[in-house]
Image (tube, helix red, strand yellow):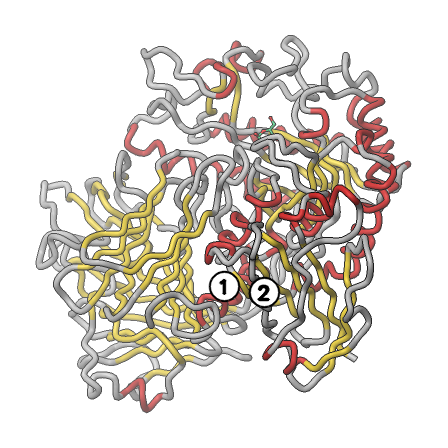
Amino acid sequence: MRSRLFFLTLLLAGLTAAAAPVHITTPRTSLVLQAEQGAPLRYLYYGARLTDGDAAALEAAGFRGQDALPAYGQGNITLTAIAATHADGDMTLDLALENWSTRTIHADADRMHAAEDAVLTEFILKDRVHPFTVKVCYKAWQDVDMIETWTEITNGDKKPVLLRKFDSACLPIRRGQVWASHLTGTWANEGRLVQEPLQPGVLKIENKDGVRNSHTSHAEIMFSLDGKPSETTGQVIGAALCYSGNYLLETVTNDTDWHRFFAGIHPDDSAWELEKGESFRTPELAFTWSAEGTGGASRNFHRWGRAHKLAHGDKERKILLNSWEGVYFNINEPTMDKMMADIAAMGGELFVMDDGWFGVKYPRNIDNSSLGDWQVDERKLPHGIQWLVDAADSHKIRFGIWIEPEMTNSKSELYEKHPDWVLNAPGRPLSEGRGGTQLVLDLSNPAVQDFAFGIVDELMTKYPGIDYIKWDANMPVQSHGSHYLKDQRKLFIAYHRGFAAVCDRIRAKYPDVTIQACASGGGRANYGILPWFDEFWVSDNTDALQRIYMQWGTSYFFPAIAMASHISAVPNHTNRRVTPLKFRIDVAMSGRLGMELQPKDMTEREIEQCRKAIAEYKEIRPVVQFGDQYRLVSPYDGLGLASLMYVTEKKDEAVFYWWKTEHYYDQHLPRVKMAGLDPNRRYKVTELDRIGEALPFEGQSFSGAFLMENGLEIPTTPNGYAEQVAMQGYSSRVLRLTAE
Ligand code: GLA
């Protein structure tokens, strides 16, 4: 659909004397702002797409404008999105609209993102006393229901201004029966869904790790406006702060009719002195609206994510074997070669050599040394990286490699040479992380940025055959101090600007390489990093049962194509749980499928089962990776099972997943109704990863209407191999639906 922006005045650009609603639209949503010259910019409406007439009649309907960017000090004291101290000590801001403009951005297709038009509307607000300008920007995509908003703050004064708060946006949400859905967790238990009603007070979601910003809280939230969240019905507003660093998302409920949602870079421990003429751009807050419940809002995030955020969102991901859980640091040529041969024989397409391949003076045998010394350890790999790239080639697969460019260890040649490159309060003892020696490099320093870029540049220049990079980041900022920065208040923000600058350089030169964001597992699942990264590692915990919960939560905001999901060995290396291979395959197949084990420890039958599953995944890969997701039964509802499905846009193919999450005698699992199908078409059902007798409906056809109104009776007990049957608690089924 082409861009449309309706102006409800007769004027084409914003020189408005009276309150003039500005109507910003996406295919199914409207955002209406009051743009009155000399007054604050006011938010009037966000929701279902309006006609011009209804948008113009909002005030007649009693809707009253809410400050779109409450500024601190003059009028607003308690709830503010932006705060600054001027050179004369004045701590207040009073922002009034000067003018606004709108234009269509004709996106050029780069090699990583789709080209689609967006409409950019910019409002210029000026302080009434100081030469201080804030541009409030709204970028409304015309192919998906997503609006991105951010601000650009400019100091026009001769002397510096200190920014103390710098939210990307404030979104007023009308009170009623509003519930919030958001994600929480920790290492090895990321992306856990929390749903709670908004109560008077503050719902505070924040992260101050400095590096890994999604282990605990996530920078995304959904508001279900019509009571307890439903996957299918009710209006939902979803928002994602697209930022790789520290953030604060606050939903404040006070004595007014509004919840006020503020989102931005965390103001704690950070401030930015803005020099004369300097501009400060805040990260985008992307927001969406759907009347189809949380499921509808998620599908909007997924479509937008694939089209406009994550790198190569329109390209199928390869099926890979990662060496980490298989061999940990025990890298050597014969082992790597054998793993490549094994994954190739199972139908995999890529092998990723994880940690342990580098370090000359200090070999990387455990996690207490060598980060920064990115030279191959020839004791382990005498023929170097090219030999591995060639070996992969001979196995007809591709080769990928693990690096951790933002880090070093005190036991490394890099640290010996550049002790001032690490973040640590000058004059204080080193505060070391992983392995007792890890340190974060100071990416605010351009020399360190060059170094980090150089790691990738050198690998890619020397070995252009490298197809995939796993970019890890395994510790937080533990000591607040940069040897480079004069103003330590800038540290957290400057670090992430440096990180962005490095990523920009890498992508400008290497647009095609696949890059995974890993940060001690799922520490970097956020839209701030995805423009440069193809996917993220959901968690170091690969236990299939816990993954059901983690992947479920993560899918609220992120598409399956971005979620790396690997089959691993049992007992699971994190929680020691033993689950049948079928269960592990059936969970991993619902995301970007990979393996994370030592194939040589598998039995012939297990290898054959994986080979078959990989072949089947290839057939459903476009459905999983590009289809619409429908979450059917939530594991969080405690019904003893979880179920979801993916359906193509054309509704001609679907994949249905059913996983049992609990097991006890006298258990009565519900029959699962499907969703997203065409009621008028008939779908043939075939079981994937089938290891036992055929289900009664194998090869049978049913109408979409029947499947959505009734569903199929899935046996609650597994059949197949003896060990599968013995582990009744972990029954699972994957069904492929093909329209006739
Ligand atoms: C982190 C990652 C793992 C693995 C190790 C290697 O913990 O999350 O997947 O790459 O580092 O040291």
In the rendered image, the vertical position of residue 500 relative to residue 410, given as above or below: below
Q: Position of residue 339 (x, y in %)?
A: 81, 31
**Residue 470 horizontal side relative to residue 57, left or right:** right
Query: Residue at position x 73%, y 47% from top?
Result: 725
Q: Position of residue 433 (x, y in %)?
A: 45, 20
Q: Label 1: few (<14), some or many (≥20) within 10 Å?
A: many
Query: Tag 1's secondary structure?
Result: helix
- Name the residue at 48% across, 35% down: 187
Residue drawn at 63 percent across, 73 percent down? 711
Quadrant in which the C terminus is drawn: bottom right
Residue 214 location, quadrant:
top left
* 198 to the left or right of 143: left
- Return the residue at label 2: 629
Report ligand 1 position as a quadrant.
Answer: top right
Query: Tag on residue 298?
Result: 1
The three-letter code of the residue at mark 2 reads Gln
- Give coordinates of residue 391: x percent, y percent: 87, 32
**In this orientation, does residue 684 appear?**
yes
Q: Residues within 10 Å of mark 2 (few under 14, many from 20)?
A: many
Which sits in the foreground, 345 or 3? 345
Q: Nearer the viewer, residue 232 or 340?
A: 232
Q: Residue at x 33, y 54 (%)?
A: 168
- Marks 1/2 in contact by CB < 8 Å: the verdict is yes
Q: Quadrant of residue 581?
A: top right
Answer with mark 1 or mark 2, whichever residue precedes in sequence. Answer: 1
Q: Quadrant of residue 335?
A: top right
**Residue 337 appears left or right of 715:** right
Residue 497 shows in this picture: no
